[in-house]
Amino acid sequence: MAEAARETWITGIGIVSCLGEGPAIHWQRLNEAPPQPEMQAFAPYIVHPLAPIELDKQIPKKGDQRQMEAWQRIGTYAAGLALDSAGAKGNADLLTRMDMIVAAGGGERDEAVDAAVLSGLSRTERPGAFLNERLMGDLRPTLFLAQLSNLLAGNISIVHGVTGSSRTFMGEESAGVDAVRIARARIAAGQSDIALVGGAYNGERRELLLLFAFAGHALKNRFAPVWERAADGGGLALGSLGAFLVLEAREHAEARNAKPLARLTAVLSGRSDRRGGSTAALAHMWQDLADRLTPERLAVISGASGAEPATGAEREWLATIPDIPVRATGTYLGHGLEPQFPMNIALATLALGHETLFPPGDSSGVEREMRGGVDQIVVTGVGHWQGEGMALVERVR
Amino acid sequence: MTSSRNGAGEPVAVTGIGVVTSLGVGIADNWQKLTSGQSGIRRITRFPTDALRTTIAGTVDFVPVDPFSSADLTERLADMAAEQAVGQAAIGAKGDFPGPLFVAVAPIEIEWHHREIVRADVQSNSDVTYDDLLRATASGRFRPLHERLMMGSVAWHLADRFGTKGSPVSLSTACASGATAIQLGVEAIRRGDADVALCIGTDGSVNPESLIRFSLLSALSTANDPPEAAAKPFSKNRDGFVMAEGAAALVLESLDHAKARGASILGVIEGCGEMADSFHRTRSSPDGKPIIGCMRNAITDAGVIPDDIDYINPHGTGTSENDKMEHLGVATLFGERAKTIPISSNKSMIGHTLSAAGAVEAVFTLLTLEHQRLPPTINYKIPDPAIPLDVVPNVARDAKVRHALSNSFGFGGQNVSLVIGREPM
């Protein structure tokens, strides 16, 4: 504790979303293309489906692909991209020492089985016995392994050989924030040298839509940028995404000649009061970072989901820092809960590499043109129902 | 980070513990039953068991949850265990625990009774689909289900109730989860992020679908009669684990902090070890290397050597695969001593408490150290000649225990070991 905290570099990023795979296409689409949400497939609900990916490139064995459901394939694929990006793929010495924290949901369902069982339950006189018979007969044994939250990490170990340690955090957006926070804290304190951290989400699932529809959080009927949804009551558009980062102690990266894509200077997470507390929580976190910030070359990449009141609370806080340019990626990518924060750190890394932001994506006044370049990006992540997170990502000169 | 001892991490004090299992509520009741060789495994009465191969479990039936919901029971059990632990530690004001929360919890899911509640609102007599359920949400009547079914809900509710600090971490490493919660607390304290942490493992998963999932993987014992004889770790006729419920909570504290406030120190977490297995989703690497590496890492982190370990609280599930592999790991790491180190499975009595197991068994290991008495492995009638271990067969006995190793292994290649000891002199 007496020794100075070690510098943490981001030495690899792996991203997939509705925009495509990898940094180049993400940057290009964020700069050139308007959001293209899917309006029909889950109508009236709006989602951002995963762009086609060639699974074989990162998950070479068909047997492995078959053992996973979509969210695990997305994550295992993105993790592979991150390891490639960090120059760590296939390096057994490195991978057996590499720590891993995955932020995961889970519970992928067989919609057809659920619907058939539910239909039958209403007609039988012995519902308990009926449920047992049908589940014993209809559930695929391996589906369980696709439902367990920790089996994304398990699949990454199997497919890519990351085995130093393996932890899975759950709990929606906060899981992503805390995964990055704790991975970084361990590196800074010397408990870890290199870590793979991130998550994945399959936004094309009706039973997940149901979860958010319960509370009226699932966006439907009319698409608008995240800052412009409050008038219709707000809402998040589920997005399929996978995002992994390789975090590494600077000295460890230098020893293996790995280049920094950016520096991860700080990660903060919070638990504010239920209602409206996010505004104050963000202000406190910003204050904690304040003496490290250079406002002239600073921007915010927001994880705003569009859900209310969370998005309104963040908007209120942003109004207190009017001179800092802001971009919300949720407008383009949709909202993927657990991986949203790692994804936005990856996109911040990308922007720092280009020393600029992509163009504004809303007309409500939150996002404005950027003047000059950018050396620091503060990434926010306000959970759609709970929790706040903030990270400071910096350009390494 | 303070590395006071040669390559090892700082020991972290335990100043409060709480536990609920199918045996009962609290330390005294559980310890008395555990050391008298009682089983908490019983016939399932919570739901019909027609068509099931396994009809027994270590359910916690004395905590009423109506209508039954695994999410609700999971939260209730954690709450009870935490109440005991925080009370014993006598730290902070009520509802103002001065440190972070790490909760090992089974993934929260929409349960069948939730789907049925929504279906009852569907205006149709024909087959229902998810689209029908989605339409039924328009009424807004199901709003509370959103929060209940968030993965983070159990931890957030506990954080609200106990006033823990910062963002509460919900985690899963399958059947190693409880040990991972403790490991995260130990690391946070060693980093100096916190002086004290509340670490919980909780599981209330005995519902039809969860039971059937394990059953379809052929992981569960089907020796339903009599229920209390079903869990037979390390026996030749072992035929699977028995699902069970429970929770345990530990207040962890830096030694300095505990001493400075004059807290009574129940024991110390001396070391944590981890190593993931990349072999298979449900099976261990045949060479046992990850298990061996995991135990070795914990022992190294504790600043001791294998010869210093006096007792092992094994994962000991009673599945053919686990017990064979765990024996291989222990035999490789401990050599000739493997035959004589006592190694007794709490799961023979309380079943496999899944996400809670690592925490529950850490608490029982602390009690083993405190009382210098080894709980038995019950139902040990037919020894497996391929697993020559001293399993403390059937009857508890006294022993001198300074350092104990507690193992937790889970699906997805998750392996965590803890070395637990007495307060350093």
Image (cartoon, rainbow, N blue to C red):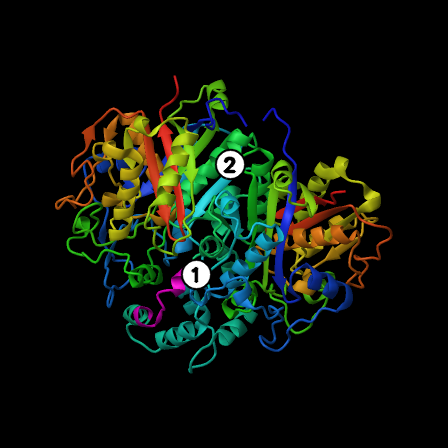
Q: Is residue A96 left or right of residue B207?
A: right
Quadrant in the rendering for residue B45: bottom left
Q: How many marks?
A: 2
The one nearer the camera, A248 or A216, is A248
Residue at far right of view: A371
Secondary structure mostly taken by the magenta-highlighted segment of the chain: helix
Residue at 23% across / 28% down in the picture?
B373
Residue at 58% across / 38% down in the picture?
A187
From the top left corner, tell me how far across and down residue A11 is, in percent: 64, 47
From the top left corner, tell me how far across and down residue B122 is, in percent: 47, 76
Three-letter code for the amino acid on which mark 1 is drawn: Gln
Q: Chain of mark 1?
A: A
Asked which secondary structure carries label 1, the reply is: helix
Q: Chain of mark 2?
A: B
For disc 2, the marked residue is B95
Q: Is residue B267 left or right of residue B52?
A: right
Residue A138 in magenta?
A: yes
Residue numbers of the magenta segment: A135-146
Asked which secondary structure carries label 2, the reply is: loop
Give the alpha-carbon distance from disc 1 to disc 2, as whole Å: 34 Å
Quadrant in the rendering for residue B35: top left
Mark nearest the camera among 1 and 2 is 1
From the top left corner, tell me how far across and down residue B87 is, in percent: 42, 31
Three-letter code for the amino acid on which mark 2 is drawn: Gly
User: Is residue A171 visible to the viewer in this orientation of the structure?
Assistant: yes
From the top left corner, tell me how far across and down residue A301 is, in percent: 72, 53
Q: Residues within 10 Å of mark 2 (few under 14, many from 20)?
A: some
Residue at 47% across / 49% down in the picture?
B154
User: Is residue A331 visible to the viewer in this orientation of the structure?
Assistant: no
The one nearer the camera, B417 or A205, is B417
